[in-house]
Image (cartoon, rainbow, N blue to C red):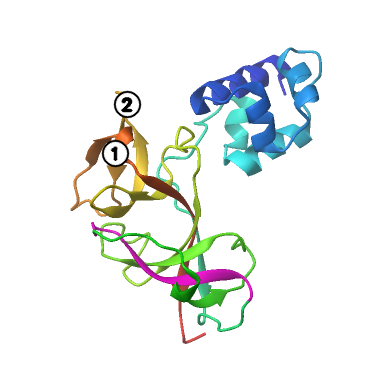
Amino acid sequence: MDNQSVIERVKYLMSEMRLRQNAFAKRIGTDISNFSKLINGKLPVSDSLVNRIVVNLGVSKQWLVAGEGTPFQKNEAPQTIVVPQISERHKGSPVYDIDVTAGALSREMTFADDSIIGYVNVPGVASGNKIVRVSGDSMKPVINDGDYLSIREITDMSVIFWGQIYVVLLDDYRMVKYLRRHEDNSMVILRSENPQYDDIELPRTAIRGLFFVSNIIHIDSRM
């Protein structure tokens, strides 16, 4: 592993995500002082640091270590988890009677306790996430009508993992789409999986809320 080359790629990630050293160190869960020394070449890049970046940021290890491929996979779908049913036990991630759409839908997202219809408690689904239902076919075959999504809210919308799936809230619509980079940094591209749907270009400022899709959950009662 070429220490300096890895450092340059880490600096690229910091620039791409618009994060300063301290903020980046916090995002990957490492000591701020040691990370500063590493960036300045005073400490070697460890396997532990590489793994923290890969796991916490979803970065390709092959790219980070060897410079091969791309930092983030394009149109990489989240893990699909199949469960037999939604549980009534108060354990795991709450499932809300909220419908996000793989098309376009005008409706608010309110995560009130009285909107909880059950829970999903399986490995791989973070208990801090919220689970919502999907309707529509614009993300088929990756996300199908009636599937559920495990989502977490993004508080800093300047940090976007390009090519990943998000629930995007606009003034009049909410949509499930891939977020792709636009040549104009003030814009983003919303892309469907279904080729029958065209790309949507919109200003970043039009986004009122953003939720990262961590898992796709399919209910199969035959299990």
Quarter-of-image position of residue 149: bottom left
Residue reaching furthest to the bottom = 222
- Magenta stretch, residue numbers: 91-105
Give the SS element for disc 2.
loop
Q: Nearer the viewer, residue 177 or 186?
A: 186
Q: Which residue does the numbered mark 2 point to in the structure image?
A: 186
Residue 104 magenta-highlighted? yes
Give the SS element for disc 1.
helix
Residue at the image position 69 percent from the left and 15 percent from the top: 4
Q: Nearer the viewer, residue 50 or 108?
A: 108
Q: Of the residues under marks 1 and 2, which one precedes in the sequence?
A: 2
Q: Which residue does the numbered mark 1 point to in the structure image?
A: 206
- For the stretch drawn in magenta, what is the main secondary structure? strand
Q: Of discs 1 and 2, which sits in the foreground?
A: 1
Where is residue 106? Give x, y as percent.
24, 58
Left or right of residue 195: residue 71: right
Where is residue 76? Give x, y as percent.
45, 47
Where is residue 118? Give x, y as percent.
51, 78
What amino acid is at disc 2? Ser
Cα separation between marks 1 and 2: 10 Å
- Against 176, residue 91 (above or below) is below
- Against 212, residue 126 (above or below) is below
Check disc 2: other Cα within 10 Å, few if <14, some if 14-19, many if 20+: few
- Against 47, residue 2 (above or below) is above
Residue at the image position 36 percent from the left and 46 percent from the top: 178
- Against 145, residue 27 (above or below) is above
Left or right of residue 131: residue 121: right
Residue at the image position 71 percent from the left and 19 percent from the top: 2
Residue 77 magenta-highlighted? no
Looking at the rendered structure, which numbered label has been put on residue 128? none
Where is residue 192? Give x, y as percent.
28, 50
